Image (cartoon, rainbow, N blue to C red):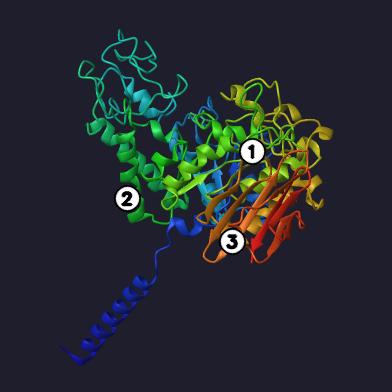
């Protein structure tokens, strides 16, 4: 070989080897690295900020408020569905999974949101409505046709229009040209996508097995949707009704296997993206692929007992009456935590777009501070529903909007200031997505910004504290120190590496005092947040003393 050519080849080979060495030296980022310190914020896009004066929130509105969210300390956003939809269930009825709904903007706006958020260190998650589409989706329109076509088996159809019922399932009867009825997933206009049946009934051959071509095609399409938004910059998905994809799956094993496969695919191709499930069974969801799973009131009465009246005579734990019982939460939480703690994170939300009341209902700023002190010092990943940082309240008595029904009151516009429409929109008030309450009746960001101990500033300070202390991160260990029915304070410890932090909470209107158990053998305790003089050393050990409605976070030294 000519010496110059040989030199060129050698040089090129060296560059390639060096490049691949450099690449292999780089440890690929994984989701767990950013989830460790993540604090999420849920945005219901309709109601966050309207940038073009049409009365409905949009993506440019969200982009404009990124500095606010960054200043609050939020590092992750979850956007409710923002895809094309007839909006009969607020966008959970998707008619094009690949296109941003025009009322929110364009795909390019969403790409910009991802990019602008990333510049501020924030990750944006979208909402993946995996289980169903709108009945207006072109796939479903095709599926309804008499002639067989690509989409015939993408939905679950009975054998004939005369099959009027199916065990444990609703059936929508006589709605199509096709001689068959379909299985809806939620409302009647949300036909269930066909992921197959774990145990198809041999007497009902229309129930296809999971590995039939229809269910397999749907599964492949779901991956395409995820890939599309990952490639545009999405950091992950909140998965709607994640536990109910495969039908007649009594132990959930077939649905779990699906997510297992998806997680293995993500770990290979998108290891830095994350999934959070609407499953509310972390002991199932997390081992089977989800990075996080929510606790939600519908099947977690212990979670509900924190903030909501769970029965006519049962007070929530975070309540001035002091009659709530933290054991109701812990008896549920501790086993879930133990079962999942090295594999993923439990997400305890302040609330969400499906839950009324809001955490701010009936609570003063001080009450809220104690609740937020709990939520922001627990293990796992906290999720703040927009407006809960200021104690925004739900509105009673509103007519249903976009399939909200009883949930509508928790979906009203974000209250930014006391200008017209609370600074949400410049549209005439009667064109707003939902009304804002009268000015004198509404907390707002502007009114709380300069008040040092406002709910807003407390949340900001607690998030900063969480970021500053590894023990308060998602994987810091959690141990209950004092939690007895009828006794306050509730005290727990968070630890990671050498760091130990104690949190003491007193939501009641009465002061409380208790001696810490001997195992809390600290030389000194340094106040980090809340009451600075709550802990006192005595000959027999540490005493904790909390005034009414207060909390203390201290570092063990
Ligand atoms: C759960 C969502 O949170 C809710 O808002 C929606 O109506 C249903 N799933 C159906 O998608």
Label 1 close to label 2 by CB (< 8 Å): no
The residues bearing labels 3 and 2 have C-alpha atoms spaced at a distance of 34 Å
Quadrant in which residue 181 is drawn: top left
Number of marks in the rendered image: 3
Per the image, the residue denoted by label 1 is 57
Q: Which mark is residue 493?
A: none
Q: Which mark is residue 264?
A: 2
Say which label, 1 or 3, has the lower sequence index: 1
> Does dot 1 land on a helix, a strand or a loop?
loop
Q: In the displayed image of the protein, which residue is found farthest to the left?
A: 1
Per the image, the residue denoted by label 3 is 500
Q: Which is in the foreground here, disc 1 or disc 3?
A: 3
| Whether the residue under disc 1 has CB within 8 Å of ligand 1 | no
The reply to whether residue 258 is visible in this rendering is yes
Say which label, 3 or 2, has the lower sequence index: 2
Give percent across and percent down for residue 321: 74, 32
Label 3 close to label 2 by CB (< 8 Å): no
Give percent across and percent down for residue 328: 57, 34
């Amino acid at each position: 070989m000519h010496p110059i050519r040989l030199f060129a080849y050698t040089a090129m080979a060296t560059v390639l080897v060096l490049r691949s060495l450099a690449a292999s030296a780089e440890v690929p980022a994984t989701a767990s690295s950013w989830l460790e310190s993540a604090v999420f914020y849920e945005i219901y896009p309709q109601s966050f900020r309207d940038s073009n004066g049409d009365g409905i929130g949009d993506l440019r509105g969200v982009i404009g408020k990124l500095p606010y969210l960054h200043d609050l300390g939020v590092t992750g956003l979850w956007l409710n569905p923002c895809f094309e939809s007839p909006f009969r269930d607020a966008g959970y009825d998707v008619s094009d999974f690949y296109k941003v709904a025009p009322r929110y903007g364009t795909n390019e706006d969403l790409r910009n949101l991802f990019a602008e958020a990333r510049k501020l260190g924030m990750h944006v998650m979208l909402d993946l409505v995996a289980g169903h589409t709108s009945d207006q989706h072109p796939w479903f329109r095709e599926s309804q046709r008499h002639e067989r076509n690509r989409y015939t088996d993408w939905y679950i159809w009975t054998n004939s229009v005369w099959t009027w019922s199916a065990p444990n399932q609703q059936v929508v009867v006589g709605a199509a040209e096709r001689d068959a009825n379909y299985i809806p997933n939620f409302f009647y206009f949300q036909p269930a996508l066909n992921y197959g049946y774990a145990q198809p009934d041999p007497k009902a051959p229309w129930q296809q097995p999971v590995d039939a071509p229809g269910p397999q095609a749907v599964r492949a399409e779901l991956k395409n949707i995820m890939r599309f938004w990952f490639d545009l910059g999405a950091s992950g998905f909140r998965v709607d009704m994640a536990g109910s994809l495969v039908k007649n799956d009594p132990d959930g094993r077939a649905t779990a296997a699906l997510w297992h496969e998806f997680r293995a695919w993500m770990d290979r191709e998108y290891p830095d993206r994350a999934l959070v499930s609407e499953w509310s069974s972390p002991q199932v969801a997390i081992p089977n692929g989800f990075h996080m799973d929510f606790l939600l009131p519908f099947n977690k009465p212990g979670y509900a007992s924190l903030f909501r009246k769970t029965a006519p005579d049962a007070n929530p734990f975070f309540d001035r009456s002091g009659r709530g019982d933290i054991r109701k939460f812990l008896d549920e939480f501790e086993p879930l935590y133990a079962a999942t703690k090295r594999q993923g994170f439990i997400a305890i939300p302040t609330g969400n777009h499906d839950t009324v009341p809001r955490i701010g209902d009936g609570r003063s700023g001080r009450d809220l501070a104690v609740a937020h002190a709990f939520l922001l010092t627990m293990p796992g990943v906290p999720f703040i529903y927009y407006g809960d940082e200021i104690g925004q309240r739900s509105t009673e008595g509103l007519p249903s909007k976009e399939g909200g029904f009883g949930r509508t009151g928790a979906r009203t516009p974000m209250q930014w200031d006391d200008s017209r429409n609370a600074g949400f929109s410049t549209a005439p008030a009667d064109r707003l997505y939902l009304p804002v309450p009268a000015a004198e009746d509404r907390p707002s960001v502007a009114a709380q910004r300069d008040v040092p101990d406002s709910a807003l500033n407390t949340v900001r300070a607690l998030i900063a504290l969480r970021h500053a202390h590894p023990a308060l991160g998602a994987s810091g260990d959690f141990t209950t120190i004092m939690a007895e029915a009828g006794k306050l304070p509730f005290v727990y410890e968070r630890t990671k590496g050498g760091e130990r932090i104690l949190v003491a909470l007193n939501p009641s209107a009465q002061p409380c005092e208790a001696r810490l158990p001997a195992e809390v053998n600290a030389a000194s305790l340094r106040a980090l947040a809340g009451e600075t003089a709550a802990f006192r050393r005595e000959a027999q050990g540490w005493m904790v003393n909390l005034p009414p409605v207060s909390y203390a976070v201290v570092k063990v030294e």
